[in-house]
Image: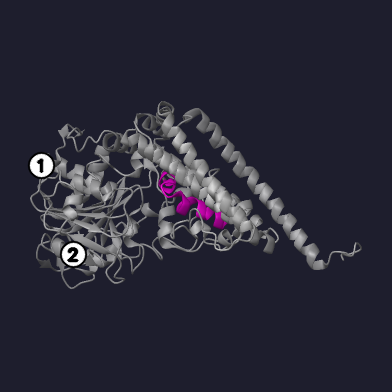
Amino acid sequence: MRNDDHKPTAAELAEAKELAERLQKLVGRSQKVWAQSLERSLHDITTLKPDPLNTAPAMAKLAYDYIDHPQKFIEASMAFWAGHADLWSRTWARAFGEEKVQPVVEPSRSDKRFKDEIWEQNPFFDHLKQSYLLTANWLKDSLEKAEGLSPQERKKLDLVVRNFIEAHAPSNYPGLNPEVLKATVDQKGENLLRGLEHMIRDMERGKGVLMIRQTDMDAFEVGKNMATTPGKVVFQNDVMQLIQYSPSTETVRKRPLLFIPPWINKFYILDLNEKKSMIRWLVGQGYTVFVISWINPDERQKDETWGSYMAKGPLTAITKALEETGADKVNIVGYCIGGTMLGTTLAYMAQNDDNRVASATFFTAQLDFTDAGELQAFVDDEVIDTIEGAVGECGYLAAENMAGAFNSLRSTDLIWSFVINNYFLGKENFPFDLLYWNSDSTAMPGRVHVFYLDQFYNRNALAKGAIEIDGVKLDLAKVKVPSYHVATIEDHIAPAASAYRGARLLGGRSQTYVLTGSGHIAGVVNPPEPQKYQFWTKAGMKADSLEEWREGTTETPGSWWPHWDAWLKKHSGPNVPPRQPGAKLGVIEDAPGSYVKIRADQR
């Protein structure tokens, strides 16, 4: 029995004092971040619409479909209650000692939310898990059976329903997560206190906005243990720095290789570390590699347009790369939105009889946005108006807006898993270079971004030949350069079928399409040595669709990089002596330059 006369020991007093001091500091820090959060919220009230994704019309259509078809509503209701009645009967059977009761529904093998064995062993948690999965499946099935929805409305509702389902998983509630409950008991609540410290830290980083850490942000530094391939910045303007990488071979190919990376992310996804670096690998194959490093924009870029980004970015980079190397033409690569920019640049050059490009390579890039993946759910006239309001007078879309949009596409993995780990379990993040890159968010130049969403996603204007830049009407059919297209089989941002459809709009006779394993990032950044995944190839692109093209393809295990290298060498000219960066243009600073080091959370 407890002795009522027990006096706290010195250790207990010290522990209590430390706890009080930590709480006092947290209160002081939280006051500032809550004030910042309130200020942001008041601003959002005046600038954002109550339905920023414009889901109300689609939700109304969904509701009216079930109202107009009462039999469908009755069947859906009966299916819901029948599933849960079956679950209750099995739960009671288990409670009364019946062994080997088969579950009504089970999570997929890849679902990590219910990996703790208590979710299966404990009848309460097992019932909770199955009830959630039944309801989730019922919601998805009800949406799938709805009629009268346009493809755009269906995508939008699918995203909303999926995020609703993922947000309401029982594992996301500390009182319903057995792993969190066990940690709280074992650690006497210390995990929750650490989690509160982590949450306030993340709100401080976001200046009032919760920017959930996905990795240890102090474990990496661009230029130190990331983006370390040797090179020099040889040119810069107010939207980009141009990096030329140092040769590592006795000879190099005459024609340089220029990368247009996306400005939605930073270019060093192509140079994460020595083992994963595509840039380092290409330098080792004898190419003179140039890379555009886009500025992380602020109000100084508010007047930039798609046309000015094209002029100051790829067109200027082509001029400077040829001036530096003395070559006649350049091979050029566009990744994601950089590939879309490449398509518009090539069409613009074709109309102006500019023949300085020897070949074009597109990584997971879309030129036709008819069925442009999950991001299409974010785009219609109402949403674009909302984004224009968010851009406001500052002229740029804040980095956390884009990060939130991308994370919401995979909210279980990129949001809720870190909420549980960081805030409920109070754990520190594991250092992971890919997640550091993913968290190193960039702002979007407002006019450029609105043009991209409206003209490409919303209107599909490039595919229709309806875009005009500086008085030049763009026609992809006029683009005759040889092209190489890389798409990934699991890509949810630039679906492989969409990339194939867009590639066929180009007018060149020499086109190569390669389908790779994995997704938007891992399928591209897949060096040869690990021998991961596979890729599929086939001569030409005469098939009308990706499905037809896949018939008779050749599957090859491992990386597609050597296949591309063999193709690229055919367009790169003879070997010449290696070129040191900046021999003609001069050197501004060492690679990776200063633009890429501008972090949105440190402004």
User: Looking at the image, is 602 positioned above or below residue 37?
Assistant: below
Looking at the rendered structure, the secondary structure element under dot 2 is helix
User: Per the image, is 409 magenta?
Assistant: yes
The part of the image, by quadrant, that contains residue 376 is top left
In which quadrant of the rendered image does the N terminus lie? bottom right
Q: Which region shows up in magenta?
A: 403-422
Q: Which amino acid lies under the numbered mark 2 shown in the image of this protein?
A: His
Q: What label does residue 563 carry, if any?
A: 2
Which color mode does the image show? Answer: one colour
Q: Is residue 580 visible?
A: no
Q: Secondary structure at mark 1?
A: helix
Query: Is-magenta flag for residue 219?
Result: no
* Left or right: 132 as drawn, with respect to 366: right
Instruction: List x then y, in percent, for residue 128.
Output: 57, 51
| Residue 509, visible in the rendered structure | yes
- Depth check: give the residue in front, 280 or 162: 162
- Amino acid type, callout 1: Lys
5 vs 390: above or below:
below
How far is the residue under mark 1 from the one under mark 2?
27 Å
Question: Which residue does the image show at 55% across and 35% down from the upper left?
Answer: 41
Local crowd size for mark 2, using a 10 Å CA cut-off: few (<14), some (14–19), many (≥20): few
Q: Residue 540, how many percent across, how many down? A: 11, 54
Question: Observer-nearest residue: 361 or 113?
Answer: 113
